Amino acid sequence: MPEYTVATLAAMVVVVLAELLWARTGIFTSLQYWLALGIMFSFQVLVDGWLTKLSAPIVTYHPEQMSGIRFPWDIPIEDFGFGFALITACLIVWLRLGRREKEHTS
């Protein structure tokens, strides 16, 4: 399996497991979280679509390191997985640290 694809899937699994087994912030049940992901993905389509377009790419990928699936336009689907993992990890840490700070100030 291609390295970029494996890394993307691993990042997504680690973040989901971190939420479900450790942080337990309830982020996956939050409408705000899903709206934030929607906003992030819409801007990612615009920027990533421009950066990775096959007609004049600014960012290129080694074909053997990814799945080869590009959607929409020429965006490697792995980019969306990494976007999910990064945004979700940041929000989980933010929520977890905020909860700990409230516990210490109470």
Image (cartoon, helix red, strand yellow):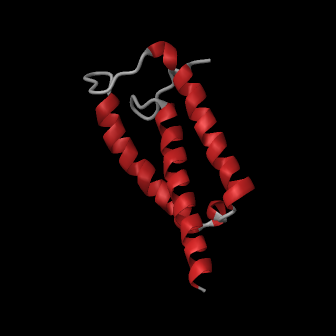
Quarter of the image where the N terminus is located? top right
- Give above or below for 97 relative to 6: below
**Of residues 89 and 101, the one drawn nearer to the viewer in this rendering:** 101
Residue 34 visible here: no
Task: Using the rendered view, name the quadrant where residue 75 is placed.
Answer: top left
Q: Position of residue 29 (x, y in %)?
A: 66, 64
Residue at position x 51%, y 21% in the image: 66
**Of residues 70 and 90, the one drawn nearer to the viewer in this rendering:** 90
Quarter of the image where the C terminus is located? bottom right
- Give above or below for 61 relative to 28: above
**Number of numbered discs on residues:** 0
| Image side of residue 23 versus residue 66, left or right | right
Residue at position x 50%, y 39% in the image: 82
Residue 89 visible here: yes
Residue at position x 57%, y 30% in the image: 7
For this orientation, the residue located farthest to the right is 21
